[in-house]
């Protein structure tokens, strides 16, 4: 028995006053009088709970607008695009006229049964957020897996700008290798310029720390004067922007016809990149497109490489005079990748000049097998030959100075 029926029967059968019942049970007297009136007019049916919905709502959303919201959500989902309340509101604002609020849109979707409740997630305030202050100040890169129409597995290498979320590059490969990462990096730099730093995880094509060395991408970034940063092991949240983009990319690809070849998949990724950069509003940057945010500020750009001296500087003890034989890392301005695409590695023609890409990591590998595994000679014999030639250059330049233990002179 509900409270209203009990109070009405207590008043009519026991004769208890309305004021006493109201004080005892913490209700208002007017509510009890209303229940008594309903009981006298309708009997026991008058004590049942009734809807509090108003009889008329002059400011309610028109039915045509609600139908447009539902149709727009269905179209966005069919295309594999975001279809949340804020995205729908942004698309409605482009057509002109009055635009309902995001809370009104979400109420329409819930009323139509189009929103699936999700379990409560970790609060966003618990994450330590960071974002670059300028475009090209920091890039994030990572590879994700996809499946072609014939069931074969491929990998997609994505590069995004940390400040604007601009998709710099998205290129598919059968398996991403060291030279592929360098090629995609230069391809993206050809579109929007070089960044100041690059952030990635600790995959084998991005980091050689697990093998006590450097990979081709790290060597190239060192030559260009670009910072190379890596996330902590087993902590993908550091590269959360590119990780979250993987989800958006796969949702869009799932609604496209299955690609039979890498060329077809590459064409689909190019279309998705244009839509993502130019037409898709991004919630994290104020519902603006990544291209708008990228063009709104000056670009950070890379820093100039520093001039460093190697241990080739020697002091002649017999005469007591210092004779500088310094060889700087600017003895060669051509990268490993540029040499690999040339007809011959002429940048290392001089036996006394060390290439800028011949970092201590490459020259101290101890054996050639580790470099060979990093470059995969079977698929890229050009890069393999260039690195082997540079290793010979290093051996030639240091062959006459192996017994010299004199400290390096400062200043170079």
Image: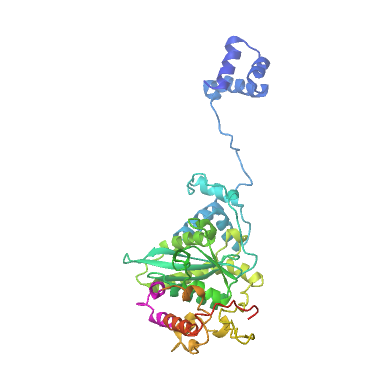
Q: Residue at x 67, y 21 (%)?
A: 29
Which residue sits furthest left? Answer: 150
- State yes or no: residue 385 in magenta: yes
Depth check, front residue: 280 or 329: 329
For the C terminus, the image quarter is: bottom right
Q: How is the image coloured?
A: rainbow
Residue 297, quarter of the rendered image: bottom right
Main secondary-structure element of the magenta-colored stretch: helix
Left or right position of 271 against 147: right
Left or right position of 374 against 198: left
Estimate the x, y position of residue 294 in percent, counting from the top left: 61, 69
Find the magenta span and give its range.
Answer: 367-386
Residue 138, quarter of the rendered image: bottom right
Q: Residue at x 58, y 57 (%)?
A: 89
Residue 61 in sight in this render: no
Depth check, front residue: 56 or 228: 228
Which residue sits furthest top? Answer: 14
- State yes or no: residue 338 in magenta: no
Estimate the x, y position of residue 139 in percent, counting from the top left: 56, 68
Estimate the x, y position of residue 136 in percent, counting from the top left: 60, 70
Residue 267, quarter of the rendered image: bottom left
- Residue 25, relative to residue 278: is it above or below? above
């Amino acid at each position: 028995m509900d409270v209203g029926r009990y109070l009405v029967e207590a008043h009519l059968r026991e004769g208890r006053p309305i004021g006493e019942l109201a004080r005892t049970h913490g209700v208002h007297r007017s509510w009890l009088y209303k229940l008594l009136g309903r009981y006298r007019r309708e009997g026991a049916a008058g004590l049942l709970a009734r809807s509090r919905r108003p009889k008329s709502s002059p400011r309610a959303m028109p039915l045509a607008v609600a139908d447009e919201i539902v149709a727009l959500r269905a179209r966005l989902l069919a295309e594999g695009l975001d279809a949340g309340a804020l995205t729908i509101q942004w698309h409605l604002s482009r057509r002109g006229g009055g635009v309902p609020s995001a809370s009104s849109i979400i109420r329409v979707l819930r009323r139509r049964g189009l929103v699936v409740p999700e379990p409560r997630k970790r609060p966003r305030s618990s994450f330590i957020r960071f974002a670059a202050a300028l475009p090209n100040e920091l890039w994030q890169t990572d590879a994700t897996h996809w499946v072609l129409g014939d069931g074969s597995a491929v990998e997609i290498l994505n590069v995004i700008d940390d400040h604007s979320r601009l998709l710099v590059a998205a290129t598919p490969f059968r398996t991403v290798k060291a030279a592929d990462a360098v090629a995609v990096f230069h391809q993206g730099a050809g579109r929007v310029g070089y960044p100041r730093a690059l952030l990635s995880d600790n995959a084998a094509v991005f980091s050689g720390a697990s093998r006590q060395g450097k990979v081709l991408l790290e060597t190239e970034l060192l030559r260009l004067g670009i910072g190379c940063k890596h996330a902590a092991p087993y902590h993908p949240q550091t590269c959360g922007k590119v990780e979250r983009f993987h989800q958006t990319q796969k949702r869009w690809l799932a609604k496209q016809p299955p690609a039979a070849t890498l060329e077809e998949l590459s064409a689909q990724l190019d279309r998705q990149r244009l839509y993502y950069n130019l037409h898709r509003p991004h919630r994290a940057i104020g519902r603006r497109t990544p291209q708008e945010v990228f063009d709104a500020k000056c670009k950070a750009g890379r820093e100039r490489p520093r001039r460093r001296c190697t241990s080739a500087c020697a002091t002649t003890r017999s005469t007591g005079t210092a004779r500088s034989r310094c060889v700087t890392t600017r003895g060669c301005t051509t990268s490993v990748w540029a040499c690999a695409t040339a007809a011959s590695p002429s940048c290392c023609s001089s036996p006394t000049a060390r290439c800028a890409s011949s970092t201590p990591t490459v020259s101290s590998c101890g054996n050639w097998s580790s470099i060979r595994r990093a470059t995969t000679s079977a698929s890229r014999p050009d890069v393999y030959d260039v690195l082997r030639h540079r290793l010979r250059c290093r051996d030639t330049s240091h062959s006459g100075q192996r017994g010299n233990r004199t400290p390096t002179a400062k200043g170079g």
